[in-house]
Image (tube, rainbow, N blue to C red):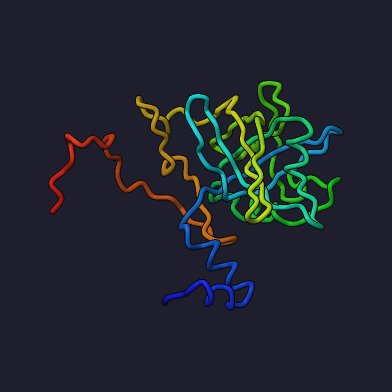
Amino acid sequence: MHLSKTDIQNTPRIKRLNIINSITGVKPANLIGSISNDGQTNLAIFSSVIHLGSNPALLGFISRPSGDVRRHTHENIIANGFYTINHVHPHFIEKAHYTSVKFEAEESEFKKCQLTEECLFDFKAPFVKESRLKIGMKFLEEIPIKANNTILVVGEVQHIVVQEEAVDKKGHIDLNQLDSVGISGLNSYYRLEKLAQLPYARIAELPDFQ
């Protein structure tokens, strides 16, 4: 199959959406937890969380344009400056997936999708108790992307909660052991399998590929 730019533009909307959302491959499945200034919790699934730097420890994610649909996650983060990122695992994929439903602002996805709010470290945003890797984030800045009116939300890591046995002596986190899952497109979920762990790439140690 070959699709030119013209072919892509002429593809029916839903099919085009599914193709373009899938071509990047498997992306991390994360639930972002937030809370409004009046105490209303919110939870939403995202597949756009990315590493931005290690010192300081920065992560980003993409927030879509509001338009006629309110983006409660973005609103809460801008309002109070804190949020959590929580890995998704096979035993609650379906619950995590349905946090994408457009609930009303006064309805918590935690309650609607039967996931458990967890308060840790007096942090001003709820973690997901069922998650085996949770990250507490502080909002730093947002960067508008003019090409499609989305926003890159940038935050700094404040807390990491992960099962100790899943972290080796060098700090590598075994996502296979954690049973974290990934997303392709908007609604296809994949189990991750660790295939190899290679050394830091140095030119002096370049293998003789055969």
Q: Residue furthest top?
A: 121
Quarter of the rendering containing residue 101: bottom right
Q: Is residue 171 left or right of residue 74?
A: left
176 or 156: nearer the eye? 156
Residue at point 83% right, 47% down? 107
Would you say 190 lies left or right of 168 here? right
Instruction: Give percent across and percent down for residue 65.
Output: 72, 52
Near-viewer residue (187 or 5): 5
Seen at 37% across and 29% down, the residue is 168
Quadrant location of the C terminus in the rendered image? bottom left
User: Number of callouts in the render?
Assistant: 0
Residue 31 position (above or below residue 154):
below
State left or right for residue 86 relative to residue 200.
right
Give above or below for 197 relative to 122: below
At 62% from the left and 30% from the top, the residue drawn is 136
Is 155 placed left or right of 169 in the picture?
A: right
Name the spot of residue 179 as percent of width and height, x first: 47, 45
Residue toward you, 92 or 198: 198
Rendering coords of residue 14 (x, y %): 63, 72
- Single out the residue that lies furthest toward the front: 146
Residue occupying image coordinates x 71% and y 21%: 122
Quadrant where the N terminus is found in the figure: bottom left
Q: Is residue 15 above or below residue 177?
A: below
* Above or below for 206 versus 18: above
Q: Measured from the top left, where is residue 201 in percent x and y? A: 26, 37
